[in-house]
Image (cartoon, helix red, strand yellow):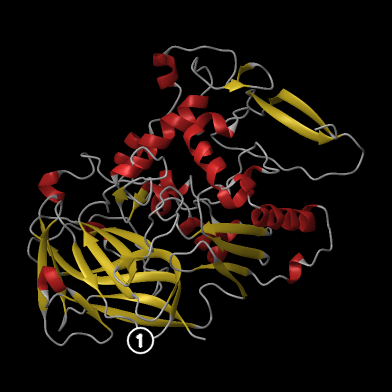
Amino acid sequence: MDKMIIERDVPILMDDGLVLKADVFRPKDETPSPVIMTLGVYGKGVPYRDAYAAQWDVLMATKPEVLQGSTKEFMVWEGASDVYRDMMRHGGIQNNGFFEWWYPKQVISVQHGNPRGWQDPWLGERSNGPTSLSDENLERNRTDPVSDILSRPLDDEWYRSRSADWSKVTVPFLSAANWGGFGIHPRGNFEAFTQAASKQKWLDCHPGRHDEWFYLDHGMALQKRFLDHFLKGTDNGWDKEPPVLLHLRKPFSNEFEQRKVTSWPLSNTKWTKLYLDCVGGFAAAGMSWEPPSKWSKMSFAALGHPLKFLSPPLERDIEITGPVAAKLFGSSTTTDMDLFLTLQAFHNGREIVFQGVADTQTPLSQGWLRASHRKLDPSKTLPYRPYHSHDEIQPLQPGKVYDLDVEIWPTNILLPKGSQIALQVSGKDFERMIPPSKAGNPWEMGNPTICTHNHPGDRPTDIFGGESTIFTGGKTPSYILLPFIED
């Protein structure tokens, strides 16, 4: 800190007369330095450890190296870009759980005038300013995202105004995606990389917790090299780097294989269909590499136990890296149904799970779709990434079979010979039992993301608590499309 000038609570007059307060960090010498601005809803002057004491205790016990040289400011490392599809309404289904948890803890806690705000250790004052407002005034001065999202079931200007227009993004950028972050961020990172107009763009794909890789040596070096090149003009070879850097996950291991490639999805992808087969019933629903000739079906209570499909053991080692899609033929006894898909893998009967952004037992990936939102946008839909327009509600006719395309978020796994791929189909959020020995651990969520979809106003039981049926084989060949990587 002896090499920096640090100014706290510097007033900044905006065009509309509003005054914002910022902390400014400058070098003491006269060396020209680029400006890096951090702007968001998280405020300033709040040490990260204050809000996440339990998680920091776990982090210090398991990975103390993360703390070495860590900064205190927050930067969006893994980010959403399309707020409707990425985080507010997955497949049209409201993601209320995340906002019910995140908004009070991370936004209201730093709201200007909140007398219970965090203490800024550098100023010795509240980080959200000296003003104290009543709860009534605080509520009037903020929005309610859960209610806002509930009242807007379709994609409209409200969502578009809060989302990126990638056709206008022409500056160089680095997009860092987390394989285990589905439901929150990685879709935005992948879409940013593929859709942005910029000619200089890079994609980093990593495992681990949400902020972990930002502070680890790899993440810090990656950011510094990128910023040095484009902000300071340092000739460090960054412009010669392949655009995609992958950290490939291995079963039951914290080790990964690093690979640099030139495109996303990978150019050597062999898109492979794995067909669902209901013939075995609940006890032995299977999957096959060829479409089943026999038509079959299975019904399940939408709010009850899920359907589970399991592939035969793999005959060779297989790499799965890329987006995943599912085509299901389904019906409901009501005028709508929600589909929650979870992609899993097993080896010798043991599920292969990873540390994700918020849970230690994260499966391969997930996808969601509200059947009344099944309409596709043909101009944006790809075989491996269906794109739903979400511009009209198309109710179901009870008992009628519908063709439903589901986007499953990108994933990666290096599967050894003998492993099995599984798909769980449910009408509600995926859940696990938390062992008593791990109860109270902040990284044991029971759900692989912080995102849950159970708002009664969005999912009334008379509509979403009916009986759902999945059809396979014959004229209804339900399948998942997997990105197998050729050697």
Q: Is residue 93 left or right of residue 484?
A: left
Q: Position of residue 231 (x, y in %)?
A: 78, 52
* Residue 212 appears in the picture as rendered: yes
Q: Position of residue 448 (x, y in %)?
A: 36, 52
Question: Residue 284's image quarter?
Answer: bottom left
Q: Is residue 385 left or right of residue 217?
A: left
Which residue reaches farthest front?
Answer: 437
How many numbered discs sit on the rendered protein? 1
Q: Position of residue 438 (x, y in %)?
A: 35, 44
Q: Nearer the viewer, residue 421 or 76?
A: 421
Q: Is residue 295 left or right of residue 381?
A: left
Establish if 439 lies above or below 337: above
Q: At 68% across and 40% down in the image, what residue appears?
A: 71
Q: At label 1, which amino acid type do we have?
A: Glu
User: Which part of the image, by quadrant, shows the N terminus?
Assistant: top right
- Under circle 1, the secondary element is loop
Q: Nearer the viewer, residue 267 or 312?
A: 312
Q: At 10% across and 64% down in the image, what residue appears?
A: 299
* Residue 197 appears in the picture as rendered: no
Q: At 16% across and 67% down in the image, what residue appears?
A: 330
Q: Nearer the viewer, residue 76 or 93?
A: 76
Question: Residue 406's image quarter?
Answer: bottom left
Q: Residues within 10 Å of mark 1 (few under 14, many from 20)?
A: few
Q: At 36% across and 66% down in the image, what residue appears?
A: 377
Q: Position of residue 276 (x, y in %)?
A: 22, 76
Q: Is residue 348 left or right of residue 328?
A: right
Establish if 181 lies above or below 284: above
Question: Residue 370's image quarter?
Answer: bottom left
- Find disc 1 in the rendering and name its residue: 315
